[in-house]
Image (cartoon, grey):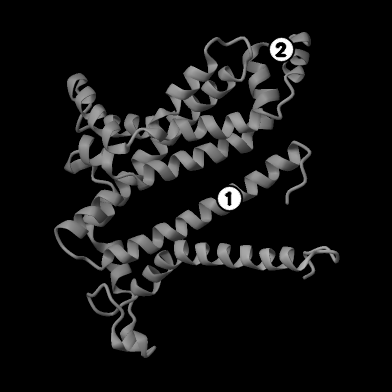
């Protein structure tokens, strides 16, 4: 009742709690399947279900052997190394291209801005299987299919729209008079960018980079089309584990990836609050 005004009607009070209940049910529906895999990853047996020992909270029913298998199995470690080679490289390319595109499209004198923006963010709209098939036929003709750079460039193309959107949102509150003031003081475009624009839009750039990293790190369809056995990433290894052999190690890997996602989302929230403070907006 503390969040409701004292003059709220009975209908407003009922809707207030109904709305909260609906939100709680949606949250439970989305989060419960993810939370379930975490205790399952400590299963002492090679099953994807809760054993009687686990349900009875018997310590013998729990084990970290699946985590040990992940950290000692050469196939999983090779997939992990590939993911940490491909994802940062794709993130760097997507961040540079996306930031430059967002800054360019923020200028009012750029013609056909809406059309260009629609084209640049189309990888987010077009079904991924179509994008992967198109990339396969294109990259196979130019000799990039089955190479690291082919996968890196494909992931960069998928991550660039996220950078464009986040940086564009940050530029909405950017005062363009600061750029003109910097130019009037004799600073060139490059110096103005690094000394004036970048410090103010940095939270948006980092947020976009994190989204691009998550997109690359979790992507599997494009890797299946463009990668070879030498570029097998962590999601590809998980997919193979489900298709060819039911390995409970997948649950341990999924739990680690959930933890990584929580950390990255927490960083995004901190950056969002910092961006609001820089723009003079009080965080809710």
Q: Of helix, strand and loop, which one carries label 2?
A: loop
Task: Name the residue located 67 percent from the left edge and 25 percent from the top edge.
Answer: 197
Labelled disc at residue 267 = 1
Front tag of 2 and 1: 1
Q: In terms of image quadrants, where is residue 231?
A: top left
Residue 140: x and y in percent read: 18, 25
Task: Name the residue located 28 percent from the left edge and 62 percent from the top edge.
Answer: 250
The residue closer to the viewer here, 64 or 47, is 47
Answer yes or no: is residue 148 visible. no
Residue 220: x and y in percent read: 29, 45
Task: Name the residue located 69 percent from the left edge and 68 percent from the top edge.
Answer: 14
- Tell me, yes or no, whether the two marked residues, 2 and 1, touch with CB atoms within 8 Å: no
Label 1: how many residues lie within 10 Å, few (<14), some (14-19) or many (20+)? some
The residue closer to the viewer here, 272 or 21, is 21
User: What residue would you read off at disc 2?
Assistant: 187
Q: Is residue 21 above or below residue 151?
A: below
The residue closer to the viewer here, 126 or 18, is 18
State the residue lying farthest toward the right.
6
């Amino acid at each position: 009742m503390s969040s409701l005004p004292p003059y709220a009607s009975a209908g407003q009070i009922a809707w207030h709690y109904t709305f909260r209940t609906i939100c709680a049910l949606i949250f439970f529906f989305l989060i419960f399947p993810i939370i379930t895999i975490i205790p399952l990853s400590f299963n002492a047996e090679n099953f994807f279900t809760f054993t009687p020992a686990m349900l009875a909270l018997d310590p013998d029913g729990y084990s970290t052997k699946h985590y040990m298998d992940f950290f000692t199995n050469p196939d999983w470690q090779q997939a992990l190394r590939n993911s940490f080679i491909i994802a940062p490289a794709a993130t760097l390319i997507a961040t540079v291209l996306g930031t430059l595109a967002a800054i360019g499209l923020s200028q009012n004198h750029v013609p056909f801005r809406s059309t260009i923006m629609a084209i640049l963010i189309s990888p987010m709209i077009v079904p991924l299987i179509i994008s992967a098939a198109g990339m396969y036929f294109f990259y196979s003709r130019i000799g990039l299919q089955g190479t690291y750079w082919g996968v890196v460039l494909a992931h960069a193309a998928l991550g660039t729209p996220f950078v464009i959107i986040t940086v564009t949102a940050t530029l909405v509150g950017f005062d363009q008079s600061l750029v003109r003031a910097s130019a009037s003081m004799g600073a060139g475009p490059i110096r103005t960018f690094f000394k004036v624009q970048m410090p103010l839009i940095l939270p948006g750039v980092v947020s976009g980079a994190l989204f691009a990293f998550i997109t690359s790190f979790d992507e599997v369809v494009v890797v299946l089309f463009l990668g070879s056995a030498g570029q097998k990433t962590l999601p590809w290894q998980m997919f193979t584990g489900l298709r060819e052999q039911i390995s409970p190690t997948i649950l341990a890997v999924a739990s680690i990836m959930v933890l990584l996602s929580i950390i990255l989302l927490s960083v995004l929230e901190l950056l969002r609050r910092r961006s609001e403070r820089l723009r003079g907006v009080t965080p809710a």
